[in-house]
Image: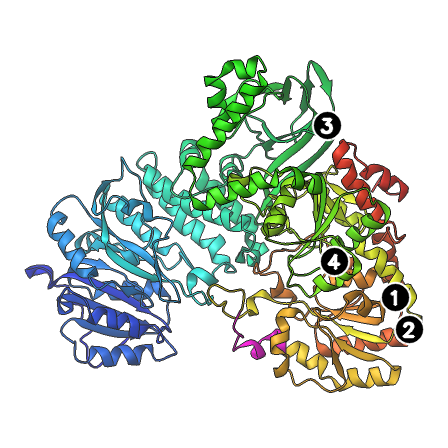
């Protein structure tokens, strides 16, 4: 360890005359030079005399200018500032080094990339003056989020403890938790009396919570000083460089943190009796985040190393054994979804479990069918379903697996039954009541109906209008409801109500009643919905079909000229259409498509939603689509159907998932046949995008700045190398082929920087019909794009260019690895380097631009709907939703797939 020449590194902890300072702050610094000016400025501008605060900076082997900046700043402040330097040994060791140098009553361990509010030390000093002589041994300051824009937000998950202002909290009565040492103050004499240090084995996270937990247990403290007025500005970097943003791929997070952090605290506390609730909450908070992160649609836990999964679950089970079931059930420090809470509650008992209740999760009024669900672990329990006194078998069924770090910790059974007056369920031979995770009901009346609370009030006031079916009185009561509701609404709500009432006018009803609504994106057509709409208008003109699109879309004029019945997205007419629609079918499933109207204002939608899909699902996108209100889900391959209809991560069964093929594939086949083989002369290069390469989004817009580091990325370098390949150009020239580059729309702004050879034809999605491009393809090169399935559907040779296979599924995309393995299931060779791509293209060219027989066979087993009847099958599946009669099985029988 070396010291700055301007500072005296000798420990100043001779306590014979008492500490020199009341407050001290230790900063463990590592490569934070770009943030230090903000921190130092905040220290200089403190209201409290900063020279009365001991500041200890320990540079942990920085390779940037951190040490030089601190050394220069400390030169004129040697009386209270110490700067030392050591070889890199991790943040715990750096803090322990700084702790040895502290000569103060209270110490905090602030982070050097953060900022302190100008009144920070003044507020802490005031609180210590008032309460420092009492039983309080730990202080918690108010952590605020400091965004890259400079905006401060009070959004920390643990902010609740500051809601009542500054005070002393008894943790036995209010078991709050404190996890961060950067916004904590500790009594120095207590730390030294119990020889407490940061444990370097607890890494990359939780070392703070571990130190705090040891401190509270060692001092037998249960009073927490809450300083709502002392604001600590925690910087949210957002660039992935902080520990909190970049630790999910570290093995230690799943082993060392749990063993030396969580388990160590549990064992320490258990040595003297049951764990205090604040400690149970501390452990649960961290455990729940492990599971919450796995449930997130986009999460870096996708990078968690599988080699540690077994050990992780073993350690979690040992920690869970110390935590009471009650603590798991009542934990409310942050929001926890039912699946996560149930996983922690049921998944680590060491034996198969099933929930003590079953739940009604869906009701289909048209078919008079209901879906019943229950949680279980391990093997599925023995079931008995009794409807109106008769044993019945499920009409449709699946098992949804909740996989956390490679293990199906929790499972959920979904069963569809015919609706009856009374339904009873027996699991393992014992009756199980209906209820929710919070409320249990001995029986469930499946025929009961609920009315709007306001109407129920009117019914209570005017029983004769309802019980005697006095229709004028009913109309009067409903009118009274409307008046009472309108008087309580604000301006926007009154506008929405007026729109809703207008939508129910006679002219609107006659125009839109039972409409079938089709849309692709709001601003773009030319996908499955467009093709299905066109088929319906031609072959079933009695259907009241409409197509939704923004009027500014480039596709509007084309579809209008063709005679499409267009409704502009987002307009009052569009709202009226949706309020009367019987069906909504779209290739997309974003909220603006499937749930565009505020249910609180317009009520639940009456239309039934069919997801036509934009591409074949080969990844696991269950986290994204499971909550969506899908009543028919169109798939293309038997393998895709089996993966989504379960058992597996999806909540859908063969009731929703229909193997029909994509509507657009009918036209794609026709276009392909119209191009003679000699004219299929395009070498198609069609990469997808990497979300992590997107530039910063401009506030209030969908526009993004260009990423200044884009050209340095592996993605850019790999595709530029391929496109600039002399071997590729020579092959194309020799074979009489064109090189057609069709970049993802997010890639287009960077094309001027690519310096592409003149032989490369660049075509964009906005101005080109993709099907016409595909129809002319001789071979395709793509990476992970679903466009590969379009090529395979046409038996077009294919090469997967996957230079970043190890990092593509890093959690920054919606999908994770799913049932489809490119090596095992793909329709072409997988290349890692640009030279491997050109080698593969040479082999394909030698074979006359035909795929190898093994790939042709895979395609034949996958694409079983190449008969131009996809539109008809999708229409019949949608029509069946109205009658409650399923057509998926007959369609599959026609395809010879009943046993698939």
Q: Residues within 10 Å of mark 3 (few under 14, many from 20)?
A: some
Residue 733 in sight from this viewpoint: yes
* Residue at (82, 61) in percent of width and height: 792
Q: Is residue 195 left or right of residue 674?
A: left
Q: State the separation of the CA atoms marked 4 and 1.
A: 30 Å
The mark lying in front, picked from 1 and 3, is: 3
Range shown magenta: 704-716
Way the structure is coloured: rainbow
The disc at residue 852 is 1
Q: Are marks 1 and 2 in contact (CB under 8 Å)?
A: yes
Q: Which residue is mark 4?
A: 527
User: SS at mark 3?
Assistant: loop
Q: Which residue is mark 2?
A: 847
Answer above or below: position of 804 versus 402.
Answer: below
The mark lying in front, picked from 3 and 4, is: 4
Q: State the separation of the CA atoms marked 1 and 2.
A: 8 Å
Q: Which residue is mark 3?
A: 394
Q: Is residue 521 left or right of residue 338?
A: right
Residue 823 in sight from this viewpoint: no
The disc at residue 550 is none
Among the two numbered marks 2 and 3 on one chain, the one whose residue lies closer to the N terminus: 3
- Hey, which quadrant is residue 102 in on the image? bottom left
Give the image location of residue 661, x and y in percent. Answer: 81, 50
Q: Are marks 2 and 3 in contact (CB under 8 Å)?
A: no
User: SS at mark 1?
Assistant: loop
Q: State the separation of the CA atoms marked 2 and 4.
A: 33 Å
Among the two numbered marks 3 and 4 on one chain, the one whose residue lies closer to the N terminus: 3
Answer above or below: position of 101 versus 729.
Answer: above
Q: State the separation of the CA atoms marked 1 and 3.
A: 44 Å
Among the two numbered marks 2 and 4 on one chain, the one whose residue lies closer to the N terminus: 4
């Amino acid at each position: 360890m070396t010291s700055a020449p301007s500072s005296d590194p000798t420990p100043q902890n001779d306590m014979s005359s008492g500490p020199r300072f009341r407050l001290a702050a230790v900063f463990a610094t590592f490569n934070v030079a770009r943030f230090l000016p903000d921190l130092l400025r905040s220290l200089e501008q403190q209201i409290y005399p900063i020279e009365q605060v001991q500041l200890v900076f320990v540079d942990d082997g920085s390779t940037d200018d951190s040490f030089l900046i601190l050394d220069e700043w400390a030169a004129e402040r040697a009386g209270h500032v110490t700067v030392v330097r050591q070889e890199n040994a991790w943040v715990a060791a750096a803090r322990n080094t700084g702790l040895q140098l502290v000569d103060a009553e209270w110490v905090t361990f602030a982070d050097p990339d953060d900022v302190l509010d100008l009144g920070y030390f003044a507020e802490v000093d005031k609180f210590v003056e008032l309460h420092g002589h009492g039983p309080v041994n730990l202080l918690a300051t108010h952590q605020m989020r400091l965004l890259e824009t400079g905006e401060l937000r009070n959004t920390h998950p643990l902010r609740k403890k500051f809601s009542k202002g500054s005070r002393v909290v008894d943790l036995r009565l209010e078991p709050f938790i404190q996890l961060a040492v950067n916004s904590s103050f500790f009594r120095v004499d207590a730390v030294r009396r119990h020889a407490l240090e940061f444990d370097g084995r607890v890494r990359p996270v939780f070392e703070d919570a571990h130190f705090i937990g040891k401190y509270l247990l060692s001092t037998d403290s249960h009073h927490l000083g809450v300083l709502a007025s002392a604001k600590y500005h925690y910087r949210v970097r957002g660039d992935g460089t902080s520990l909190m943003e970049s630790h999910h791929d570290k093995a230690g997070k799943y082993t060392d943190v749990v063993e030396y952090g969580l388990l160590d605290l549990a064992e320490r506390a258990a040595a003297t009796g049951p764990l205090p609730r604040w400690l149970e909450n501390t452990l649960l908070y961290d455990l729940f985040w492990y599971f919450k992160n796995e449930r997130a649609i986009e999460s870096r836990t996708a990078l968690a190393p599988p080699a540690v999964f077994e050990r992780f679950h073993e350690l979690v089970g040992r920690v869970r054994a110390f935590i009471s079931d009650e603590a798991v059930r009542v934990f409310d420090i942050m929001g926890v979804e039912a699946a996560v809470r149930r996983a922690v509650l049921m998944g680590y008992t060491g034996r198969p479990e099933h929930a003590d209740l079953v739940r009604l999760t869906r009701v289909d009024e048209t078919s008079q069918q209901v879906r019943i669900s229950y949680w279980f672990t391990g093997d599925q329990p023995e079931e008995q379903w009794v409807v109106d006194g008769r044993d019945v078998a499920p009409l449709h069924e699946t098992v949804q697996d909740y996989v956390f770090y490679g293990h199906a910790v929790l499972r959920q059974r979904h069963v569809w039954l015919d609706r009856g007056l009374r339904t009873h369920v027996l699991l393992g031979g014992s009756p199980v009541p209906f209820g929710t995770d919070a409320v249990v009901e001995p029986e469930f009346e499946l025929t009961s109906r609920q009315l709007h609370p306001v109407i129920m009030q009117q019914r209570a006031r005017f029983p004769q209008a309802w019980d005697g079916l006095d229709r004028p009185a009913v109309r009067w009561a409903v009118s009274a409801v409307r008046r009472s509701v309108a008087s309580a609404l604000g301006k926007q709500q009154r506008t929405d109500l007026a729109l809703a009432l207008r939508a129910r006018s006679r002219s609107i009803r006659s125009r839109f009643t039972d409409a079938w609504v089709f849309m692709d994106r709001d601003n773009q057509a030319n996908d499955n919905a467009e093709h299905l709409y066109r088929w319906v208008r031609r072959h079933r003109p009695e259907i009241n079909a409409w197509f939704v699109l923004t009027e500014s879309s480039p596709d509007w004029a084309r579809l209008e000229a063709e005679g499409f019945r267009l409704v502009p997205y987002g307009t009052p007419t569009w709202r009226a259409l949706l309020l009367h629609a019987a069906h909504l079918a779209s290739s997309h499933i974003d909220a603006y498509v499937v749930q565009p109207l505020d249910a609180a204002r317009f009520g639940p939608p009456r239309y039934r939603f069919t997801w036509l899909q934009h591409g074949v699902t080969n990844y696991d996108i269950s986290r994204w689509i499971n909550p969506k209100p899908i009543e028919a889900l169109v798939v293309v391959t038997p393998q895709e159907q089996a993966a989504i209809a379960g058992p597996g991560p999806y909540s859908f069964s063969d009731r929703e998932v229909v193997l029909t093929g994509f509507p657009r594939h009918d036209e794609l086949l026709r276009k392909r046949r119209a191009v003679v083989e000699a004219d299929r002369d395009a070498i198609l290069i069609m990469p997808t995008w990497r979300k992590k390469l997107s530039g910063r989004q401009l506030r209030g817009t969908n526009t993004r700045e260009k990423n200044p580091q884009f050209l340095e990325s592996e993605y850019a370098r790999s595709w530029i190398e391929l496109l600039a390949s002399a071997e590729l150009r020579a092959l194309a020239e020799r074979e009489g082929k064109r090189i057609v580059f069709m970049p993802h729309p997010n890639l287009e702004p960077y094309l001027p920087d690519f310096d592409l050879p003149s032989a490369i034809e660049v075509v964009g999605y906005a101005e080109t019909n993709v099907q016409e491009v595909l129809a002319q393809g001789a071979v395709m090169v793509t990476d992970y794009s679903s466009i590969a399935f379009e090529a395979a559907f046409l038996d077009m040779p294919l090469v997967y260019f996957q230079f970043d296979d190890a990092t593509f599924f890093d959690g920054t995309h919606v999908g994770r690895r799913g049932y489809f393995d490119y090596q095992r299931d793909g329709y072409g060779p997988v290349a890692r380097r640009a030279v491997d791509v050109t080698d593969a293209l040479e082999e394909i060219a030698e074979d006359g631009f035909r795929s190898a027989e093994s790939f042709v066979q895979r395609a034949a087993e996958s694409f079983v709907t190449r008969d131009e009847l996809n539109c008809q099958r999708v229409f019949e599946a949608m029509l069946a939703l109205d009658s409650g009669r399923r057509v998926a099985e007959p369609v599959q029988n026609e395809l010879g797939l009943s046993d698939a």
